[in-house]
Image (cartoon, rainbow, N blue to C red):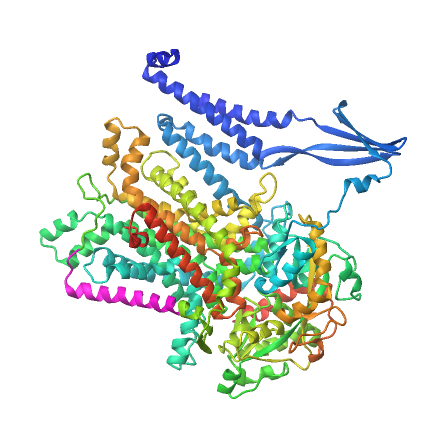
Amino acid sequence: MPRKILLSMFVVIALALVLVACAPETIEVTRIVEQVGEQVEVIVTRVVEGEVVEVEVTRLVESEPVEQLVEVTPTPIGGQLVLYACLFDPDKLEVLFQSFEDQTGVDVTCLDMSSGEALERIRAERENPQGDVLFGTTNLSHVNLAAGDLTEPYQGDGWSQLPDGALKDPDGYWSGFYYGVIGFACSPERLAEISAECPDSWQDLLDPVYQGEIVIASPAASGTSYTTLSGLAQLYGEDGAFEYWAQLDENIAQYTESGSAPGRMAAAGEYAIGIAFAHDIQVQQDQGLPVEIGFPEEGTPFEIGGISIIKGAKNMDAAKAWVDYVFSRPFQRYHNDIAHRIPVIEGVELADGTIGLDDVTLVEGYDPTEWAAKRDDLVARWQEEIGSQR
Amino acid sequence: MTSPVATWTANLSSTKKRRLLFALLIAVELLALALIATYLVGYEYVETGVETAGDVETVTMQRQLIGDPALLLLVLIAAGLPILSRNLRREPVVLVALQAAAAGLVVFVVWPLAGVLAESFREEFGAARFSLLQFERMVAQPIVWRATKNTMFIGIVASSLATAVGTLVAYTLTLGDIPWKRALRILTVVPLVSPPFAVSFAFIMLFGRRGLITYDLLHITRYNIYGPQGIILVQLISDIPLVILILSAVFASMSRDLEDAAADLGGRPLHVLRTVTFPLVTPAILTAFLLSFISSISDFGNPMLIGGGYQMLATQAYIQMIELFDLQLGAALSLILLIPALAAFLIQHYVVSRRSYVTVTSGARVGAAYTRKLPGWIKWPLFALVLFFAAFNLLLYGSIVVGAFVRTWGFDFSFTLRNLNGVVNALPNLKNSLIVSVGAGFVGGVLGVMIAWLVSRARFRGQRELDFMATVMYAVPGTVVGIGYILAFNGSPYFWTGTFFIIIVAYAFRRLPVGLRTSVAAQKQVDPSLEEASLDLGASRVRTFAKITFPLLNRAFFAGVIYIFIRSMTDLSSAVFLNSGRTQLFTVRMFRVMITGTPSQAAAFALLLIVIILLALGLLSKLTGKSFVDMFRIA
């Protein structure tokens, strides 16, 4: 009996092999485009293993160019657009999605995720992309994606308006659409308890009065904190930055995994100081929480938030339209109003009470390609010198 | 009996009839396999060259094999091996059930995990060469050793405490004659209806540095909830309900005859409890310990929220994969995490399988739990413990309810409905979560009972391997499950990402172990002679299962369904990978709000989720005709 069974198993395997094997080895498709009088004739011939199996003739009126007949762009675009790494509360962005839908008929879905999650998903889904646009997150992520050939270059309206340099990729793989600056979230209550003030320089932070009262995300876990680390490296040089951080470490109460958590914790009065993006701290202020913002006078690290189109996006037209839309004045203004990120388009006015580039001293020497490339080494060094010492 | 076929079959000897049926079965299976084969393996034409001469454009295309021939081979082996067993060939029903279970487990457990395993032996994404680079990198990092040590510490402390407290609570609630039983039963398992990370969140609201109790009430400022102490406390709250569910199912179905006999023979209550009652439930206690140990070491949500930078393997794996895009190192780290989990499983399996505690005998009164008369000095301390645990849960969840309706927790406690706005916008996500969870609950529940029956009743070689395949998912962190499914099923020929299907199977197989272990524990309590009697009297396997086995197991079945439903509703770690624009889940929205929003906004999300789960449980209790308390107690 077992022999019979083995035999039948063999049959199954053979069956599967035959299914594969009976398919032809090569196929040749010949397409001849010919003009016959007023018509253009397209003749497609299929040759399988040397034998002609199929001839297809299409006649087109000459006055209409072939390409246009093949590719007709429907207006409005319609369909669905999936944004990855929704950088801000999707509820608040709903107004923007609605106005985009009114213009283009595209239904926008924004998926909340951290920048790391977004990158991992885009990479894992590369054969069958589920998202159309990576919307937001620091341009270092976009640099990595472009290097991995996972995004599609697009030199749209926004890209052309931006100056060369840190704001855009020279080939159009990504474009920066907002600035984010690092600030100190200060809890007035907590500071009063330890009789201290909101610091306004990196050196102030080293004061022992803040011992156990400062929260910052781990650069090994958060892009926000990597922005801080690379900013310090631009300010003090790499060795200087690590020397500084080793001193700062004495005052750090905990390293969080999330970049916005320090701002939230200081706002809730759990700790005196949280180091985070100013826009995240301002969002806490909007909630009515008593939190103040200080900026280091020596130089403030910053990010440029980018946008890029995911390669193989299911709704490419909508993706391009969305990228253009993001650089439109109404978007830039409204986005600043609700999410407090700083606009990149010249002449867009800041909303009342939001922090602008004029309020801070930016660190010099920011080059996204350089800092994206150095990330692994700097993070590993941080882990070795700081993270693993705790 | 007039048709020729009927006459022909009637004339056949029983042996021949059996052989004929078997041949038919094999034919049908071959057909099914062929269908699977064409799905898994195929070919496509890839352009290899384009030549243009004037107006003539010639495209040459080459045939390429695509798909997963390796998976096809695995499925063939899984479905083929059972046929080799002579015993199984005699029982086609068992055979088919086994084949289906084995093939399902191979595709949805082994294959995704193999994907992750393969990933951890790669130098970089998509690299074809085998490499030990990730392990070298890991050994070089002291953090890995510390994380391993920390993980073991948390796992052992949290699960021992959870098992001890949970067992006592389950015993008191099921068999003790104590007041307010109904309310206490619900309150003690209420953490099950919320995502584990909501417990951390409530802890921080109440006992954090600015917690309502620690700061506003007691004015303690130097005390810190962040750290291992926080993780252990939170893990206890999340794991105890699981222990309670597993053990009350067993306590309730336990015959009191043995205890009565021991008492009649003069055993004092404590003596009976120690020497009769608890030994009888040892397999279930071990099961509970195993499951809560694995849950403690593989959870990442709680350590992330309340750990204050305390390094654990699951968080490190999560950080490597999610934050640092280092899929390979993350996969390697989660492999380390699998080792203690695996060890725990093997120990449990060895100990439990060597003992047999059969207490539901043919004469037993199955179903009703009889309360024991306990002397006051045992009863009241136990009652106090239950009461304390219930009150603590009430406090935690009360703070979520209150938090959802105040302006800013900790600063402004005036009433407001503004936090509900965010929740209303998230309703489509809630619908997605419900679709996925109901689907996963039933798929997982059916699988659980079926595999439990195969593992504990049928006799065949490879039983342990089957059991292992079905249980191993419990030890795998949700993040790894999510990544594994994406790695395995995103490309051709599947293209399953972005569908409800992939989330449903992921949840069903990931949560299957609890349904399975509950069913196995229940099976171990049922005397095989009940089934044997039915078979001897001429009932078929299927009839015996439907009339004898399942009715004895249906509590375990519903326990499994409900558990999987709730865990799917509250899962976060797999969800972040498996949901997409069209299938976005509620918890994903909720977690982001906890990170970026105020406590009050997050509390509103948690509250809605809890209400929805309670409503679903109520509906299920209506459908099954069991009381609402039963939905929780399942005993």
Q: Position of residue B122 (x, y in %)?
A: 60, 49
- Quarter assignment of residue A26: top right
Q: Which residue extends farthest front?
A: A102
Q: Which residue extends farthest bottom?
A: A195
The foreground one among B633 and A89 is A89
Q: Position of residue B243 (x, y in %)?
A: 33, 56
Residue B586 in view (yes/no): yes
Look at the image and tell me in which quarter the N terminus of chain B lies.
top left
- Quarter assignment of residue B404: bottom left
Residue B434 lies, with reference to residue B401, above or below; the image says above
| A88 on left or right of B612 | right
Q: Is residue B393 magenta?
A: yes
Magenta range is: B372-399
The residue positioned 20% from the left and 61% from the top of the image is: B178
The foreground one among B591 and A144 is B591
The residue positioned 43% from the left and 70% from the top of the image is: B403
Residue B275 lies, with reference to residue B63, above or below; the image says below
Q: Position of residue B23 (x, y in %)?
A: 43, 21
